Image (cartoon, grey):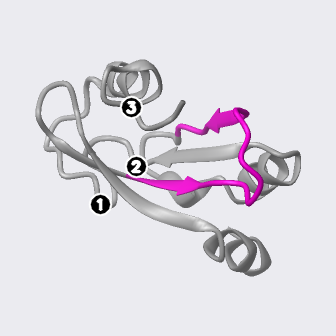
Amino acid sequence: MPKETVKILKARYEEREIVSFDHLRLHGYLCVQSEPNRKWAVLVHEYDDSGLWFGREALAFYQAGFNLLLPDARGHEKARAHKYSGDRNTVKAATHGETTQIR
C-alpha cells in the first residue's frame, strides 16, 4: 500500500475482532466516515494478503463516502484461525448477522 494511502486511512481506521459463527476470533479493520451514513464497502483480499492490502481501492471507496470493513481472511495476518474455509459465511454474518454492529 502506498505510504500516503496508509497515512490517510490509518488516521481513520480501528482494529476490530469478531467471533465467527464457528467460534474463531477473526481480525479486521473498520474505517468509518466522520459523518454517519449507511453506505458500506466490504473489501475481501486474496489468498496471501491482509485486510490492508486494498490501498488505492479502499481510499477511493472512502473518498466516495463509504464506510469500510477490511477483514483479514482466516489464517492471515491477525485472524486467529487455522483453517481457511468459511470466509464467505463470516462476511455474511459480519454484515447481516444477529450480532453485527454494522447497521
The residue carrying pointer 3 sits among few (fewer than 14), some (14 to 19) or many (20 or more) residues within 10 Å by Cα, namely few
CA–CA distance in space, label 3 to label 1: 20 Å
Element carrying mark 1: loop
CA–CA distance in space, label 3 to label 2: 17 Å
Pointer 1 and pointer 2: residues touching (CB < 8 Å)? yes
Residue positioned 37% across, 42% down in the render: 73
The stretch in magenta equals 28-44
Does label 3 or label 2 sit earlier along the sequence? 2
Residue 48 at what x, y percent from top left? 42, 49
Q: Which residue is mark 2?
A: 72
Q: Which residue is mark 1?
A: 78
Residue 100: mark: 3
Residue positioned 47% across, 53% down in the render: 49
Residue 21 at what x, y percent from top left? 20, 25
Residue 13: mark: none
Lateral position of residue 71 relative to residue 41, left or right = left
Does label 3 or label 1 sit earlier along the sequence? 1
Residue 33 at what x, y percent from top left? 72, 55
The residue carrying pointer 2 sits among few (fewer than 14), some (14 to 19) or many (20 or more) residues within 10 Å by Cα, namely many
